Amino acid sequence: MPATAPRAPVYLDHNASAPVEPAVRDAMIAALDLPGNPSSVHGPGRAARAALDRARADVAGLVGCPAGSVLFTSGGTEANALALAGPGPVLASAIEHDSVLAAAPGTIRVPVGGDGVVDLSALERLLAEAGPGARVALMLANNETGAIQPVVEASAIARRHGARVHCDAVQAAGRLDLTALAGLVDTLALSAHKIGGPKGVGALIVADGAELSPILRGGGQERRRRAGTENVAGIVGFGAAARLASGRLQAMERVGALRDAMEARLRAAGGQVFCAGTPRVANTSCVAMPGVAAQTQVMAFDLAGIAVSAGAACSSGKIAPSHVLAAMGVPADLAGAAVRVSLGPATGPAEIDRLVEAWVGLARRAGRHAA
Ligand code: PLP
C-alpha cells in the first residue's frame, strides 16, 4: 500500500511572525555582500548607506511620512521602549503589548470595554488626573483579537490635554492604511517580521519636533537617537517587505472574507469568537472552544500540522491568562480556552478547511461540538 503523503503544513500564526517573502530574502542576501559600515565615508561605506536610505524611503512609504522620520530599531519591542522612555506619566490601554505596558514604571492602564476597544471617556478622565506632560500609548490593532482602536479620536483627546501620543502599529502594518495617521501621532512603532520581513528589525517613526530620550547612546547613528551600527541586511529586508506590504492592502478584503467564513463555521460548531462585532484587522480571529484548554488545542492542531497560538505568541510558553481578554472582562475559564488564528495575505480556502476540520474534530472528541 502506498504510504499517504504527509499533508502540507498550515501556518496560521502570522501575528506571531510572518514567513519571509522570497523578494525579501533575495534583497537580504544581496545586502549581506555589502562589506561597508554605513558610517564609513569610503565607497563600500557609501554603498551600505545608500542601501539603508532606500529602505528608509520604503518604510516611510508604508506610513506616508518623510524618510527622515524613520528611525531603525531592533524590532517593535525596542521601538515601543524608545518611544516611552523619558519623563512624564504614561497612560496605556490595558490591552497593549507587554513591551508597551512594561516600558515605563507606573504605567496607568486605561480600561477597555467588552468589545475590546479602549474606553475614551476613561482616557479623558485619566488624562485630566495625570496633569501636564503625560504620554498616551494606544495600539492601532490588537495582536490577540485584531480589534482596531480609535487612535484618531484618542489623539484628539490627548492633544486637548497637551499629551503626546505613541501608537504601536506593529499588527496594523500591511493590514490597514497607516497613512491615515499622518500628523496625528508623535511616534509610531513597526516591526519587520509581522509583514514578511526578517525578525529582529523594526522602526520608530518620529514626527517632526517629537522629543526622544535615547536608550542606546554612544554612536551618532540614526541622527544620534539610536547608537550602534545598523543591521544593514535586516533593514534592507524590512524595506523590501514594506514595499510589498504597501501594495497589498487590497488583498486584505479577500482575507477578511475568508476569516469571516471560517468564524461562521467555528461558531456553528460551538466556538465563541471574541470581538466579533468590533471593527478588526481582516486577518485575525480569537476563538474559544469552551471547556478545552488553549494549550491542548494548540498541541492538537500542531499534531495535525496546523500552527496557531494560544493568546499572544510573545507570552506563550508561560501559561498565563491573556491580559487582553481579562481586560475585556472575559471569565478566566473561557479566556483559557481561546486560540488565536492569524491569516496571511496568501492564506487560501484549503488551509482554512484544514483548520475547521481539525477544530471540529477536536471539539467532537472533547464532547464540545455544538451539533
Ligand atoms: N507590539 C505588538 C502589538 C506585537 O504584537 C509585538 C510582537 O508580537 C510587538 C509589539 C513586539 O515586536 P517585536 O517582536 O518586533 O519585538
Image (tube, grey):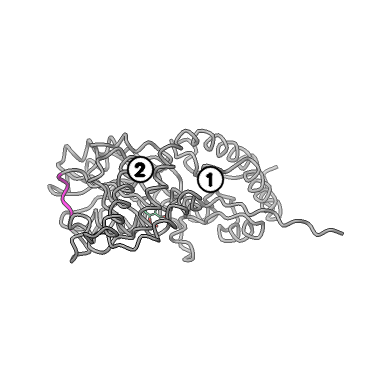
Q: What element carries label 2?
A: loop
Q: At which x and y percent is residue 225?
A: 19, 57
Residue at 48% across, 62% down: 316
Looking at the rendered structure, the kind of residue marked 1 is Leu
Residue 185 position within the rendered picture, expressed as x and y whole percent measured from the top left:
24, 41
Judged from this view, the residue extending furthest toward the front is 43
The answer to which of marks 1 and 2 sits earlier in the sequence is 2
Residue range of the region highlighted in magenta in the rendering: 209-213
Q: Name the residue under label 2.
A: 140
Left or right relative to 90: residue 301: right
Q: Which residue lies furthest to the left in this view?
A: 132
Residue 51 magenta: no
The outermost residue toward the right is 1
Q: Is residue 59 above or below residue 292?
A: above
- Ligand 1 closer than 8 Å to label 2 CB: no
Q: Is label 1 in contact with label 2 (beta carbons under 8 Å)?
A: no
